[in-house]
Image (tube, grey):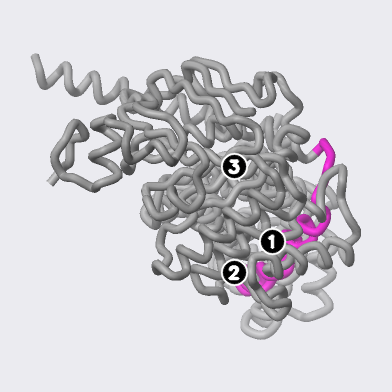
Amino acid sequence: MGLLRDLIGGVGRSALALLGGLGRGVLFLFRTVAAIFSLPFYIREFWHAVLTIGYFSLPVVGLTALFTGAALALQIYAGGSRFQAEAVVPSIVAIGMTRELGPVLGGLMVAARVASSIAAEIGTMKVTEQIDALVTLSTDPMRYLAAPRVLAATLTVPVLVAVGDSIGIFGGYLVGTGRLGFNTGAYLQNTVDFLETWDVLSGLVKGAVFGFLVALVGCFFGMNSGRGAQGVGRATKSAVVSASVLILASNYMLTELFFTG
Amino acid sequence: MIELRGVHKAFGANRVLCGVDLVVPKGKSMVIIGGSGTGKSVALKCILGLVRPDAGAILVDGQDVTGTDRESFLGRFGMLFQGGALFDSLSVWQNVAFRLLRGAQKSSPDRAREIALEKLRRVGLKPEVADLFPAELSGGMQKRVGLARAIADDPEIIFFDEPTTGLDPIMAGVINELIREIVVEMGATAMTITHDMTSVRAIADDVAMLHDGVIKWTGPVGEMDASGNPYLDQFIHGRATGPIEAVR
């Protein structure tokens, strides 16, 4: 009886903690959006965030896209050859990269790189009282720390996705023409003919949503970091895991919204 | 004048402040003493609005702090944090001039740098330090930069949170002297929390002893040694036995 009570109590406590965390997260989201649309806007912090989130993520996103596009071409060729459909490689690589793999893998790479660094940086600022210092210096941490980072990520991740899409398609092209015997002109023609504007745009919209979520989650866990090195470490880990799960879940919901019904 | 009336604050089951009553007269230097974890920092953070009290009132010049415009209210304060709390990503002069470079009263970068250099000189730092980053400074220099930041726009009220913690005795003496000089020179109301008795004697006009979430004794620093209060006596003489339970 005692064991059952402990079990039910444990489940209840976990559920309450989860709901509490969810509520704090939603409130944080509203506060961040309000901070983005209110003055003062810290333009220097914004450009710094554009540089660190966008520009410095280019190598990792580019390399990921290149190898993904190349592997995708090999897989589609191998699968397509079972029913004599090898010719679809260029179009499927293009559609797969722009609709799904470009935004999702780009988002996950940014989550690993950016959510962790934002959470660690803000978490360290919290444990060393730098956030308290900001408040005493009449500066709202939401406006100074969260708003520039979240806006920068929302605007730069779609650009990263566009670059990743192009590099991924190029990776497929390299393998298609170099290893699988496609004619270079035909490959490019096939890619262009089958790719629609909405394929690209939907991926960019996904990128903006993923960028927003990654930075938001990084800021949230950083500002709610526990004490000491362990607290910052836990905040960093939670930020990466939560951002990754949110990207995959929101990707499914956006795909439902964009491509069904 | 700063006035705390029956301030309560608990974190979960941990009751930190249990009805703190304290008055800090304008232009005076009040030092709050007490053991670690007795709520000294929480009391300070309640006044600044960094922590919201569960009950009670905090008045600054007769005005309830919860009913005032946050930016103009905080604009009257300067604070030196225990660890300095300098912004790692900004250079020393940008840290000192942080408030001067932002907000409604913002100065031009040239003017802000000029003021920052003047404040750095006031705390005994040379202009060459201005372009370094906090990570390149020693603990004592970081405290000085923190002090320069706290006084950068000549606040009416200055808070010092454990100003000498982690410093060697000579550097601690230098910081104590600087604090005393600056407070007298600016005519500011000062509130310091510490458990360093040398600091208390160097900085304080008045002393308040916080224990078990309430003020056990308050009075002029000159009356501290003859107070006859058992809590204060045990604390200032560093005795292991007495009404304050010492965990071994």
Q: Amino acid at mark 3?
A: Ala
Q: Main secondary structure of the magenta part?
A: helix
Identified at 63% across, 44% down, the residue is B158
The answer to whether A31 is drawn above or below residue A236 in the figure is above
Q: Nearer the viewer, mark 2 or mark 3?
A: 3
Which residue is tagged 3? B190
Q: Secondary structure at mark 2?
A: helix
Task: Give a yes or no on whether discs 2 and 3 share a subunit.
Answer: yes
Between the residue at mark 2 and the residue at mark 3, the CA separation in whole angstroms equals 25 Å
Above or below for B244 versus A237: above
Q: Amino acid at mark 2?
A: Pro
Where's residue A90, x and y in %? 72, 67
User: Which span of residues is magenta-colored?
Assistant: A37-64
Q: Earlier in the sequence, mark 2 or mark 3?
A: 2
**CA distance separating discs 2 and 1:** 9 Å
Task: Check whether the beta carbons of the residues at disc 2 and disc 3 lie within 8 A of each other.
Answer: no
Q: Earlier in the sequence, mark 2 or mark 1?
A: 1
Disc 3 on helix, strand or loop?
strand
